[in-house]
Amino acid sequence: MLHRLSEAVVRTILATPPVGCVVPGSVFDAFGWCPSDVLEWRRPDLWTPDGDVTAANPGGMVFVMREACEFLPRELALLHAPGLGLSGEWALAPYAIDDATDELYARRVAPGSLLWLAAGDLAGLVWGLHDWAHFHNHGPFEQRAWTELQCDLTALVWLRQNRRDVGIDDATWERARCALSGVALRRFVEEGAPYQEDWLSAERLVDLAGE
Ligand SMILES: [Zn+2]
């Protein structure tokens, strides 16, 4: 669902239905504690869906707070998301994704009641979806590569399901899939654990997307 908020800002309501847990059950202590439903995403009308997705934190991506929230680190949204007509709105500090994952769960605050996503390129959208998965599934982060793999997989399924509203073609989705697969592989290598290419295979993700 796509709405033009103004000449320069487009708001898209992305469907983010729950995706099943495909990693070992011990990875999360509260998988799906809050069933995900939608993510509100705003972007500048002119955005760049063809940029690269890498492991780096994407610039211009931030979760904006619907109201000032006292229990999470915050910064002015405008500092991170220009071009969206923001002024005094607060955003979750970009370094505080783990804090939000912990605190939203501890306080049972539904992520969508507090946050919407500002992102102006494909990397920002992909990592925003990845973080959206974290927020709905609490884990102790003792098996980091596995935790992140579930969030990568969920982000790619959601990107696939929403690709028409997002405005990307299959080749762009495939590029994002290959990028996240490479990032996931490196995490497993760093932990000295084996990685199987088919965990994030196109066939599997398309199937999980319900196609
Ligand atoms: Zn993550």
Image: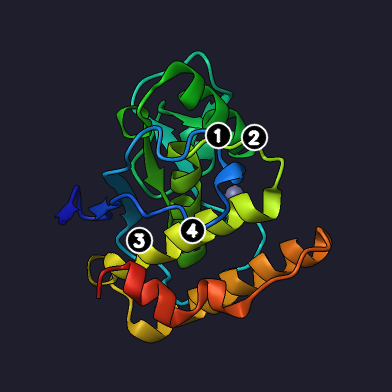
Q: Is residue 108 left or right of residue 13?
A: right
**Residue 22 shows which numbered tag?**
4
Residue 166 visible in image: no
CB atoms of marks 2 and 3 within 8 Å? no
Query: Which one is in front in this view, the residue at disc 2 or the one at disc 1?
Result: 1
Residue 168 in the image: state x and y as whole percent.
33, 76
83 shown above or below 198: above
Element at label 3:
helix
Q: Label 3 amino acid?
A: Trp
| Earlier residue among tags 2 and 1 | 1
What x and y, as percent, mark residue 151? 51, 54
The residue that mark 2 highlights is 140
- Neighbor class of circle 2 (other Cα within 10 Å; few <14, some 14-19, many 20+) is some
**Whole-number angstrom distance, CA of label 2 to CA of label 1:** 7 Å
- Do callouts 2 and 1 mark residues in contact (Cβ within 8 Å)? yes
The answer to which of 8 and 129 lies nearer the viewer is: 129
Label located before the other in sequence (3 or 1): 1
Q: Name the amino acid, label 4.
A: Val
Residue 29's tag is 1
> Relative to residue 45, is residue 100 drawn left or right?
right
The answer to whether mark 4 is within 8 Å of ligand 1 is no
Seen in the picture, residue 109 relative to 150 is either above or below; the reply is above
